[in-house]
Amino acid sequence: QKTAKAAKPTSHTYTVDYSGPANDKIFDAPAYEKFLIDHIKIEGKTGQLGEDVKIERQEEGKLSITSTKPMNKRFIRYLTENSLGECKGEGEKR
């Protein structure tokens, strides 16, 4: 008989480097972090990261997103672009 082994939960780490815009004073890091917390979806629900997703500031100008649930890099990129659109104002986005 073969017994099924429990798979280890794999974690995926994504790093967002915003040091360039932050140095130019056109990027608000705490607002971006709050935006990600409010908009990342886990199992179809936003704002409920729990133990599945950790968002931490690394060194100056870098943010680390660690997830135990599957998440696309493109989704983080999409949220980043939306966050920048909110910062600049919707009229300037186009």
Image: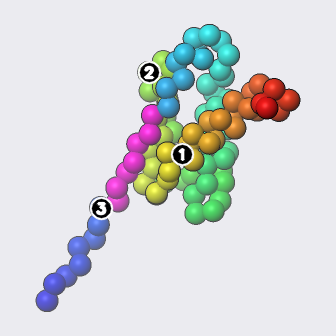
Residue 52 magenta-highlighted: no
Measuring 46% from the left and 57% from the top, which residue is drawn there?
Answer: 70
Give the crowd class for mark 2: few <14, some 14-19, many >=20 residues within 10 Å: few
Q: Amino acid at mark 2?
A: Glu
Point out the stretch of residues depicted in magenta. 9-15
- Quick one: quadrant of the C terminus? top right
Q: Which corner quadrant of the image does residue 80 belong to?
A: top right
User: Marks 2/3: CA distance?
Assistant: 29 Å
Label 1 sits on residue: 74
Viewer-nearest residue: 94 or 12:
94
User: Marks 3/1: CA distance?
Assistant: 24 Å
Above or below for 79 versus 10: above
Q: Amino acid at mark 1?
A: Arg
Give the crowd class for mark 1: few <14, some 14-19, many >=20 residues within 10 Å: few
Measuring 54% from the left and 45% from the top, which residue is drawn there?
Answer: 74
Whole-percent x, y for residue 18 in the image: 54, 23
Query: In screen coordinates, is 20 left or right of 15?
Result: right
Q: Which corner quadrant of the image does residue 8 belong to?
A: bottom left
Q: Which element carries disc 3, helix, strand or loop?
A: loop
Of circles 3 and 1, the one toward us is: 1
Query: In screen coordinates, is 57 left or right of 93?
Result: left
Label 3 sits on residue: 8
User: Marks 2/1: CA distance?
Assistant: 23 Å
Mark identifier at residue 59: 2
Measuring 77% from the left and 30% from the top, which residue is drawn there?
Answer: 93
Measuring 28% from the left and 71% from the top, which residue is drawn there?
Answer: 6
